[in-house]
Amino acid sequence: MTTLYKAHRAPGTHVLAIGVGKYPHLIEGAGPLAKNTLGLGQLTSPPVSVKAFVDWCLAPILKPGAAGFHNPLVPLASLEALASSEAATTVATPGSTVELKAATRSNIQHAFERWLNRVACNENNIGVFYFCGHGIMVADHYLLAEDFGESDRLPWDKAFDVSNTLRAVERDVKGALYFFIDACRKISIDVALTLGANPHTLEAIDSRRPVICTSSSLIRATGEGELAFGLGGKVSRFTQALLTAMSGYCGVQDAGPPTWYVDGEALASAVRKLLENGNKTPSRRQVSSQDISGSSVPLLRLATAPQMKVEIDLSPEEKRSRARMYVLSGKGRRFDHDGAKGVFQIEVPRGFYSVGARAAAREFADIHYEDQDLTPPLFDLTMQAQ
Amino acid sequence: MKTLKVLLSDPLSDRLSSDAFALPLKVFDLEGSLVGEGAASRAQAAIFKIPKQTDPVFVSLTWPSGKTQTKRINFDGVDATSVSFMDETIRRDEWSAWAVPRLHGKSELERREVDSAIRIDRFDRVWLRLWKFSNGLWGETSIRPIAQYRNSLACQVDLHLEENPWLLQIGGANVPWRLVSLVGGGPCRVLLTPNDSKDPRADPLKIIVTSFRYGAETLLEFLSRDSMAEAKALSQFPPLAQRIFDQKAEDPIAVVAGAYFLLRIGDWNSISTQLFEELADVYRWIPDAAVICCVVLIRRGLRDHRDKLHARKLLEECIHRGLPVFAEGLSLMQEAASVLRGPTESTSEGLFGIVQRVAASEAWAGSAFSFYGQEPALPSPEKVVGYPSQARALKKKSEPSISVRSASRRRRVSVPSMPNSDEEPNSAISISIDYKVDYELPLRNKESLLFLGDIGNEAVVEKLTSARLAVVNQLIAKQEAGEGTNAPLQRIHAKISELEAKIANLRVAEREIMALDQVLARQTKTTSAPKPKQKPGPKATPPPKLKGESKASKLAPPRQTIGAAITEVLDRYGALSAAEITERIQATGRDITNRTVSFALQALKKRGLAKSAEGQWTPPLSRTQRGRSRKAG
């Protein structure tokens, strides 16, 4: 089954989520090996990631008040999902627990068409397309379905061109589009030099029709020519950053009622910062990239101010152990921390704060930073003790 | 409501002397709620209305690099106050101040004291070369800086470029060869500084360019980083909006920047395709105008085959006139190519192949268009390093390689190592295959190279020139000794033979075409011989009247350029306003608008072929006037 949730809401948000970890025709796959595997093998993170994404979308419906998709003006109206993995991927839905269908090229096509028909039926709808799996970047971005490599004669038959799919959809959908692509964009020199790859789009571009889309945000797990990473069997780094950002760690308040909007620009910026914060291993650095165009149409509308992950350290470490660190809000709310317990980690609402440290027995001069703009999702500061 | 006035202030920086240069501002309350948005320059303040009960507020100024500067404002019972943002902290050296807002937020270039180990002199052997697009071809040309600057972190050259598309190429032993578009038709400044970015895509050296249109360039810098809110705030800043959106604006580059902005925010329907076709016609050295027009047509929907052909012609024009000046142009080229390509057309050949190859080779230089490659006509995603005579493929140190030899070329299969890591890439490529082809280009135009060590350092100029001569002498000695089977002299001889064969073939084709032209000329009964290349100012020749339909009649007669038509009118009638010139040209049966004439007049003025005073346009000094002067004397 691919349709996990459907409600009659207009306008509404329609989601299509795809995770591909099992590739039978690639290295270590169960099926006949493709003639040219491009060196690609099996992945364990995408099925887990797509499940995390779907769970996040459905959470407030299954358990009101839970962190998840929240947009009272354009609520969740449908959810399609596909996953390919060795073990079945199951998702709890409002009706029952559902096993996701395999993300073959054919299933992706059918799910995509259902999703597109729903998104296009109201001019204020929002369409969300999420993909996690293998990707390849030439001039455009190609994504690989489970059955990629099935035919040696038509190796690209089981892939699709997501860049041009988006260009085609922009002629169908008047509302807003959000594409989250959690796949590598490593340029294959092999493919790039010969430019032999030319997979189809999920929808042909009809050049006779004008572009009608109001807003489009394409956020990719990585920059051009780079790899995206995920811990084996766990949610990928990009998806984790995306879900964190969408769970109240970004947003901009506009004039009017106290509502915090999360649009493509805010989301892209937050995801980038969260990923950068996770770049602890130099060889596994991951920097997301984005293409934002059109007007700002929020994907989420939150009633509370976004939270900040604050991390304050003091160097050198021996002085930190004798320090009393603090965070003081502009309205006078104070948070203290004993440096002997390690790095000061706290979550506070977005705003302007003073931060600093004092030595227990004047081992170093007081440190105080006034009026720090704590912009979500992160504030990371290492103070230097003199 | 209370009033808050915000200004930029830095009288010493030429960057701020432009009235259109502004930076976006946001005003927040204590809890970070947005109170107001706007933009301010040195000349024009941003005025914010603040609710009575909101005190204090925080004003945040954003640089194109994303860095912000925030100031606390306490009203303390008063109803109006003001604040100014000084950028003295970013001015280590006055000449480099313009580039700092585009650099990484923690760039050492903004500090007064330098403690970095990454100094520019580590890149002294990095070379630059300049490419000019002229007569449909890219050719190397000498770099002749009109000013040079240097400190321990950066070097900078000022150039004056003719009205052509230009590319600056950079390369070195560890610096991948890449090309960056420069804006022609005036002064241009290039700053090079070590790149301290931790982005895995980052190149070792950062190149920042300006054509001194700080307002329009700042807008494009925000766009290139997808900072849409900041770009929108800037676009509403009146002095900038006047330059980029006013269809009577004089600066075509600013108008192009404005169109890129409108395309990005989805307001492309407000772009006049007629204006951009005219821009493309008058400013042939700005290929961006053609692709902007092409994409606007595409987004409006191509109703029939004729529309499609027209859009395709515009895309071809963009490519045949060089390459876009701005990075935004590349995404438009990709969009156009993906829509215009027919179902049976290859992505790897012809027009679409070129777009694919350039897109796959894209590099980052902020708002400037940049790509990797050995030459402008050879963009390649495979990075090469080394000196122009000794290019080699860039090898990633982290990737052990297994060499597989073949008769014609070496094929190296690199397997990324993933030891002791439980992280798996959602990888497209676990094995990347690169081809070690013979990249050695002949050592040509060595004088046209400029080494970074030469910039702004007279002592180094002398030393490096000697060093380069020594290298050249070594090569000549090797050539004379005939060392190795790939001796450069032998390859040059082989290349000469190959080119001679091609020239011989072209001569045959030339003779055939000339013979065919004579036959066609007889058929159409026109006796005029091919004319030499027209220079600005000749009188228009009316097209010959043809009797009957023939094959030749379908060939369009050579069209007089707008500049030539204007010069002719001015020569004939003397001082005229732009509107009167338009009327005179329209009277000859040519469909032309005031805007086109206005653009063309500006172009002629820049070339010294027309001048204006009090709304009247005249030729600079006509032949007849000169004659009269002599007689009078």
Image (cartoon, coloured by chain):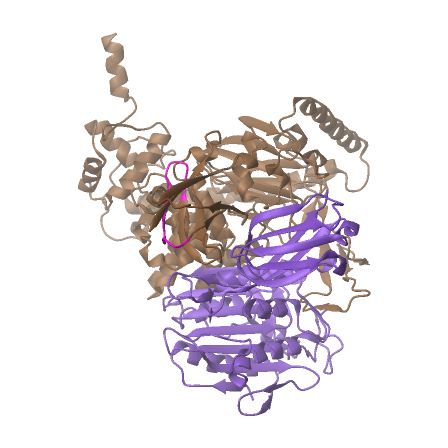
Chain colours: A purple, B brown
Question: Residue B323 in the image: x percent, y percent?
Answer: 49, 47
User: Residue B109 sits in which quadrant?
Assistant: top right
Q: Position of residue A337 (x, y in %)?
A: 68, 59
The region drawn magenta spans B40-54
Residue plotted at (21% across, 27% down)? B575
Q: Nearer the viewer, residue B196 or B486?
A: B196
Residue B270, position in %: x, y? 32, 55
Residue B214, compared with residue B411, is above or below; it is: above
The residue depicted at 22 percent of the width and 39 percent of the height is B582
Residue placed most toward the observer, A241 or A341? A341
Q: Is residue B42 magenta?
A: yes
Name the outermost residue toward the front. Answer: A361
User: Which secondary structure class fits the magenta region best?
Assistant: loop
Q: Quadrant of the C terminus of chain A?
A: top right
Quadrant position of residue B448: top right
Nearest the camera: B190 or A309? Answer: A309
- Horizontal and vertical percent position of residue A51: 62, 79
Task: Tally the marks.
Answer: 0
